[in-house]
Each structure stands twice: as C-alpha cells, then as structure tokens.
Image (cartoon, rainbow, N blue to C red):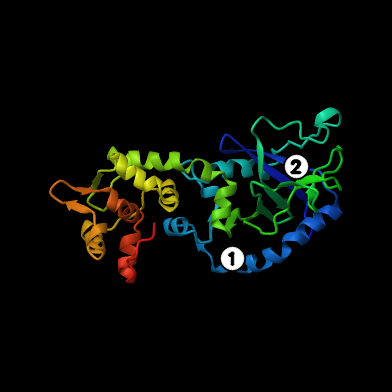
C-alpha cells in the first residue's frame, strides 16, 4: 500500500482548527506507513466485529464504528466531521510554511498564536488513518518525522520534529464514510474533548436541574443537582465528567419501576430517593454517582445482566 498524502490537524481554543498538508517524498511516505503498519493490520481485521456507536460504547470506551455523514450538530463529533469533510472535498489549501532566516529560522510561521498540532492524517487511495500526537511529542535530537526548513520537503534530518505515533487511533473509509474508532480515549484526546468536558458536563447538569432533561417513560425530574456538594462530588470524578459530557437523551427509556428495581439492588448508601407522587428523584452527594448511572441506563442494563456494580 502506498500513502498519497500526509496532513497534520491543529487545534486552537480547545477546538479543532485547521488541516495542513505536509510536502513529503515517496520514501518518507513509505517510512511513515511502515512505522504504523504493524499496529494497523490487526485493528483492521477486527473491524467486522465492532459494534455501531451507541451510548454504552461511548460510556464504556468500547471501540465502535459510525457513518460520518450521519453525524449531526449535536454530536461531539461534529467539529471533527467539518474538518475532515473539508479535507475530503479538497477544500484544504493550507501548507505549512517555515521561516528561513533570523532567530525563528525553521519555525512554522503560518500558525496562529496558541495553535498546536493534535494529530497526523495519513491518506491512501481508500482510507484516512488518524494518529494521535501526545502533548510532549515535539522533541529534539531523536529519530523522528522531522519538519523541514525548506519549501519542498518536510522530512529531513534536522534535530527538531514530531515523534511519529506507532499506533493508529482511527480509520475512515473514504468511499463509505464509515469511521472506525480503535482507541476511544486517545481519539477523544486528539479531538480536544478533554479540554472542554467540564463545561459540557455542567451544561448537561443544568438541563437536568431546569427540567429540560428527564428520565424514564414517566418523565421523572432530578432534584439536588443544584447543590454545590453534589456538583463537587461529580466533578471530582474524571469518569463521571466524561460520561456526563457525552450524554444525549436516549431514544427509549426504561420505566420508573424498572429503574427502582435496579436501584433497590444497590447498597443502601447508594440509593437515590424516589418521590413518585411528584415525579422526582432526589440526589445527594452520596448518591451522585448513582445519578450518572441512571441517566446512562447503566444501572438498569446491569440489573438485566445480573451485574449491578457501579463504577464511576
């Protein structure tokens, strides 16, 4: 397989920003592919066994696939869809430019302030391969994919560059537009989701507080989420914040009877209080993690499977 192009995608202000083309020769492209080929082959062979994106897949960090063209504006993937859509439609005209003289010789000169590289995109005739870059991947004096100070190539032996990731995070089939996410956590990191999860989580909590979001087929509301102690309990858990930030109202809900059955199988200190006369569920700091489990249907699903452990 031969790579056709290599791109880098940047972020700015906690959002994906632009895609830049890297001018690379055939030998460099071959070297890049060989670097991640060993990781890609077994992952591609597993694609037929992957499940389509669902709430459970998002919450439990299970590899998934989805049709990119079906991603809507409410999805956490919408910004990614826009950036990659521009690339697929040949609307990416940016090429990294470098300073040739003075103290900034060799530095990228067409990045905005606070713009940084988030991931590499390797393109062949059928796919786009996404390789997430860690925050400390810009290194010196090591054998890496190096950034050139010339106009014609970006892979030369200079003591500065980006460490080429050995693992493929996701693959997009260019024909079907199906996206296969192999490593959910790394994929979300490269989309800068970690940088704005708390704000998204707060927005979800606010909608529950205001009654815009409800639970069960009886539309029960939660009370207690406005308490500072409850919010502190939620935001102290990285897992809870991640799950809240991904929340979308489920297409179908369990009945309040099923939810109560599930909750009653938990330890007493984890049980939320149901007020059926007023269609409300009361949340305390001690039961905050149960709230997260309920809204994502985790408790009820585990009741059905016989496993009611809650891990937040």
Image quadrant for the C terminus? bottom left
Instruction: Tell me: residue 39, above or below residue 6.
Output: below
Question: CA–CA distance between discs 1 and 2?
Answer: 28 Å
The spot of residue 62 in percent (x, y) is 50, 61
**What residue is rendered at 73% in x and 36% in y?**
93
Q: Residues within 10 Å of mark 1 (few under 14, many from 20)?
A: some
Quickly name the residue at label 1: 47
Residue at 24%, 66% in the rendered image: 265
Residue found at the far bottom of this picture: 306
Q: Quadrant of residue 303?
A: bottom left
Mark found first going from the N terminus, 1 or 2: 2
Given the current orientation, which residue lies at the most extreme top position?
A: 102
Q: Residue furthest left?
A: 277
Q: Is residue 49 visible?
A: yes
As drawn, 116 above or below 266: above
Numbered circle sitting on residue 186? none
Where is mark 2, residue-wise? 21
> In the structure shown, which secondary structural element does the residue marked by tag 2 occupy?
strand
Q: Position of residue 153 (x, y in %)?
A: 85, 43
Identified at 20% across, 60% down, the residue is 257
For this rendering, which residue is in front, 46 or 251?
46
Q: How dense is the environment of label 2, judged by Cα within 10 Å: few (below 14), some, or many (20 and up)? A: some
Please say whether residue 212 is visible from this viewpoint: no
Where does residue 227 sit, x and y in percent of width and height?
28, 40
């Amino acid at each position: 397989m031969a790579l056709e192009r290599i791109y880098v995608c940047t972020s700015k202000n906690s959002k994906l920003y632009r895609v830049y083309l890297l001018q690379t020769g055939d030998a460099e492209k071959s070297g890049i592919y060989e670097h991640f080929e060993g990781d890609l082959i077994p992952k591609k062979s597993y694609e037929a066994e992957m499940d389509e994106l669902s709430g459970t897949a998002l919450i439990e960090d299970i590899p998934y696939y989805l049709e990119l063209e079906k991603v809507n504006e409410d999805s956490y993937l919408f910004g990614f869809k826009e950036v990659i859509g521009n690339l697929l439609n040949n609307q990416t005209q940016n090429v990294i430019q470098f300073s040739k003289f003075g103290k900034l010789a060799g530095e990228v000169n067409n990045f905005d302030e606070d713009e940084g590289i988030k991931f590499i995109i390797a393109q062949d005739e059928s796919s786009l391969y996404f390789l997430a870059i860690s925050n400390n991947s810009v290194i010196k004096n090591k054998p890496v994919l190096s950034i050139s100070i010339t106009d014609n190539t970006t892979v030369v032996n200079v003591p500065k560059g980006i460490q080429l990731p050995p693992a493929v995070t996701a693959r997009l089939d260019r024909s079907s537009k199906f996206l296969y996410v192999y490593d959910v956590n790394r994929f979300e990191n490269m989309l800068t989701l970690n940088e704005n999860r708390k704000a998204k989580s707060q927005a979800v909590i606010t909608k529950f507080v205001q009654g815009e979001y409800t639970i069960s087929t009886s539309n029960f509301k939660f009370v207690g989420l406005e308490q500072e102690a409850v919010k502190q309990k939620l935001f102290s858990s990285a897992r809870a914040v991640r799950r809240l930030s991904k929340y979308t109202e489920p297409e179908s809900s369990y009945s309040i009877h099923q939810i109560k059955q599930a909750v009653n199988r938990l330890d007493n200190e984890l049980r939320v209080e149901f007020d059926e006369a007023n269609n409300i569920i009361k949340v305390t700091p001690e039961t905050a993690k149960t709230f997260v489990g309920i809204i994502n249907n985790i408790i009820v699903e585990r009741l059905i499977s016989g496993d009611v452990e809650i891990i937040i």
